[in-house]
Amino acid sequence: MVVSGENLCVLLPRVHPNGAAAQFRVLREEDGIIARFFANTAREHLMLLSGPWATKRSGGEVQLVHLNGPEDVVFRAKELHGALAIQFRHPLSAYQAFGIALSLVHHAQVQAQQMQQQAQAQAGAQSQPSSEPVAAAPAAAPSYAQASVGMHRV
């Protein structure tokens, strides 16, 4: 999973309707799915999901579409009552959807910690006189930074 600004991209092995998934035996760095994706090899065995990264401004919802297939939403996650509720459908397996959900929660926790450290650094800088301007407050982290995960296949 890669978060770049407001966008989220996920690269996964493709799951076929019968439940079989592409297997990648990584013996060398160039055997991994990221290296194969950028080398434009084995793309028929990979799926790329993309969507906006959820923030409190977007209601904390993530919707991922399958970019190398029909551009329908295949994964949706939203905070509901302190839990991260997710919905997913083919071509994602339950295992892949759960992995994405865990990645979202982990990323939100890291983002919340970084924001807290920045706020503490700014508070420390403001308590000492300085002629340098103080940076603006960072954007709010997703509120599911400490959420549990519930799943539902649609």
Image (tube, rainbow, N blue to C red):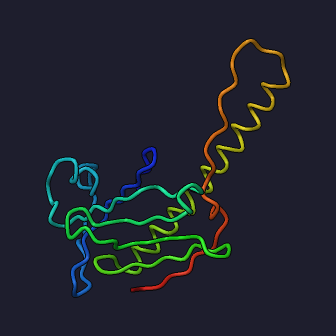
**Is residue 33 toward the left or the right of residue 153 in the image?**
left
Residue at image x 24%, y 71%?
Answer: 14
Give coordinates of residue 25: x percent, y percent: 26, 64
Quadrant that contains the C terminus: bottom left
Q: Along the line of sight, which residue is nearer the eye, 29 or 121?
A: 121
User: Image quadrant of residue 31?
Assistant: bottom left
Residue drawn at (63%, 74%) of the image: 83
Q: Quadrant of residue 49?
A: bottom left
Which percent across, then down, holds residue 110? Answer: 60, 51
Q: Residue at x 74, y 32 (%)?
A: 121
Which residue is at the front of the view, 142 or 44? 142
Residue 114 spot, x, y in % from top left = 64, 44
Vertical comparison of 100 with 118: above or below: below
- Residue under the image location 22 percent in, 53 percent down: 37
- In the image, residue 51 lies at what x, y percent? 38, 59
Image quarter where the N terminus lies is: bottom left
Q: Is residue 93 left or right of residue 133?
A: left
